[in-house]
């Protein structure tokens, strides 16, 4: 699916998404999930084609035909796989959706959320071709009601650009995401960002580097928010204990699904660390899972969960995800993820399909 507007981070530009949608069937009912990896192994080690193989050859054989008491038991069944959490998570989330539908519950309630009837929304704005283009985009999103702006930064597109944004919008809730573009040796440059009253700086250092983030946080007044670094509740616990961050971005896929996302949420909550829901340019299906996740009680900051139309000319669900003028999304109350799948369109954009049956099925 082509993106309405290209999305650029410190690791590259995306113009078109190749997304894996997972359907799981049991008891005559379907549950749906999305594998949230990118098209290249640049955000983490996964990409669309690796995910296809991991799901087909390692996740599906462990899940199909196995009797699960609850969807919560699924994660442990695929925990022998190293990494590849987005691949596991796409299937895991589909099973939670399936279980919610079997029980007739909204997914948000089913995962133990439901703390909010509406979730607060922010937007993530990629690196643009020019500063005026960025300022114009920010203006548009503020007009639409979004509650906070996240801008991507990288060396060469950081302090001076943030200064211009702050000059134009002195009062807005603003943050910056570096996607691991810096090293600790560049701490002085990152310290320059302290004067702009940012809500947080997201993942400035390496994707797997908690120790250096702790050293950096000791020098910054702006809170660090970890994204890439936090793949498990154990990582969250270690990062918090080391004071490597003051905030955590939880992405459903990055941690391997709802079971681990809830555990990360709980660890953060127990330590008084606020969390928010990150995004991976999801189709409507992944987006609805993010909405459900965002209703756990410690999701107190606006997330990167925003309207379908910011990404897609037409989404694969109906209605599309819409944002109120107050910058919130209303949490649906229908069973499962609470939207309809637009099968006509989903079929139109499907380029590859594979069905895998349980060993006992004929
Ligand atoms: O770091 O949060 C990130 C998109 C792709 C890869 C990594 C990130 C992002 C975003 C986009 O920031 C969030 C969204 O709007 O879906
Ligand atoms: Mg990020």
Image (cartoon, rainbow, N blue to C red):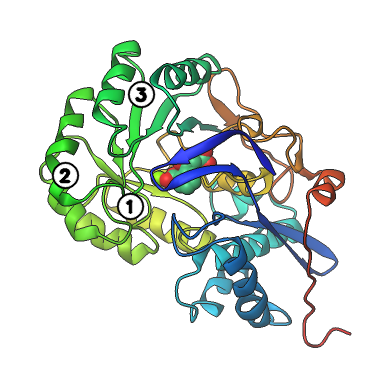
Total number of numbered discs in the rendering: 3
Tell whether 361 sits left or right of 163: right
Residue at image mark 3: 173
Q: Secondary structure at mark 3?
A: loop
The earlier-in-sequence mark between 1 and 3 is 3
Crowd around label 1: few <14 · some 14–19 · many ≥20 (10 Å):
many
Is 135 situated above or below 27? Answer: above
Residue 63, percent across and down? 66, 78
Say which of marks 1 and 2 sits in front: 2
Res. 209 image quadrant? bottom left
Image coords of residue 316 (percent x, y): 75, 43
Residue that badge 2 annotates = 186
Work out whether residue 154 or residue 245 is closer to the camera in this orientation and state it: 154
Alpha-carbon neighbours of circle 3 within 10 Å: few (<14), some, or many (≥20)?
some
Which image quarter is the N terminus in? Answer: top right
Q: Is residue 309 at all visible to an observer of this figure?
A: yes
Which residue is denoted by mark 1 in the rendering? 268
Q: CA distance from mark 1 to mark 3?
A: 22 Å
Q: For the residue labelled by badge 1, is the local secondary structure a helix, a strand or a loop?
A: helix
Query: Between disc 2 and disc 3, whose residue precedes?
Result: 3
**Pointers 1 and 2 in contact (CB under 8 A)?**
no
The correct choice, above or below, for 136 with respect to 318 in the image is above
* Quarter residue 91 falls in: bottom right
Q: Ligand 2 is in which quadrant of the figure?
A: top left
Give the vertical position of 43 relative to 274 (above or below).
below
Q: Residue at x 60, y 46 (%)?
A: 282
Mark closer to the chain start, 1 or 2:
2
């Amino acid at each position: 699916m082509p993106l309405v507007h290209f999305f650029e981070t410190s690791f590259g530009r995306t113009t078109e998404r190749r997304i894996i949608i997972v359907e799981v069937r049991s008891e005559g009912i379907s549950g749906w999930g999305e594998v949230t990896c990118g098209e290249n192994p640049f955000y983490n080690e996964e990409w669309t084609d690796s995910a296809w193989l991991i799901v087909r050859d390692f996740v599906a054989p462990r899940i199909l035909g196995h009797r699960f008491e609850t969807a919560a038991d699924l994660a442990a069944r695929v925990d022998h796989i190293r990494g590849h959490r987005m691949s596991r998570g796409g299937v895991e989330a589909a099973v939670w959706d399936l279980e919610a539908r079997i029980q007739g519950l909204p997914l948000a309630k089913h995962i133990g959320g439901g703390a909010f009837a509406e979730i607060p929304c922010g937007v993530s704005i990629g690196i643009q071709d020019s500063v005026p283009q960025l300022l114009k985009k920010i203006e548009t999103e503020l007009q639409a009601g979004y509650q906070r702006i996240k801008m991507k930064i990288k060396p060469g597109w950081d302090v001076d650009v943030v200064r211009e944004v702050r000059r134009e919008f002195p009062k807005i809730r603003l943050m910056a995401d570096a996607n691991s573009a810096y090293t600790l040796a560049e701490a002085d440059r990152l310290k320059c960002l302290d004067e702009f009253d940012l809500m947080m700086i997201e993942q400035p250092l390496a994707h797997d580097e908690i120790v250096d983030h702790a050293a950096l946080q000791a020098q910054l007044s702006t809170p660090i928010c970890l994204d890439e670094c936090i793949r498990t509740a154990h990582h969250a616990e270690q990062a918090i204990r080391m004071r490597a961050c003051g905030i955590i971005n939880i992405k459903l896929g990055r941690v391997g699904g709802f079971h681990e996302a809830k555990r990360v949420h709980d660890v953060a909550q127990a330590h008084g660390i606020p969390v928010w829901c990150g995004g991976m340019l999801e189709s409507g299906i992944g987006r609805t899972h993010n909405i459900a996740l965002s209703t756990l009680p410690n999701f107190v900051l606006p997330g990167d969960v925003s309207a379908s139309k910011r990404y897609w000319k037409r989404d694969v669900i109906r209605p599309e995800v819409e944002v109120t003028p107050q910058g919130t999304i209303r949490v649906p109350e229908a069973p499962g993820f609470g939207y309809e799948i637009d099968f006509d369109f989903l079929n139109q954009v499907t380029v590859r399909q594979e069905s895998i049956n349980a060993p006992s099925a004929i």
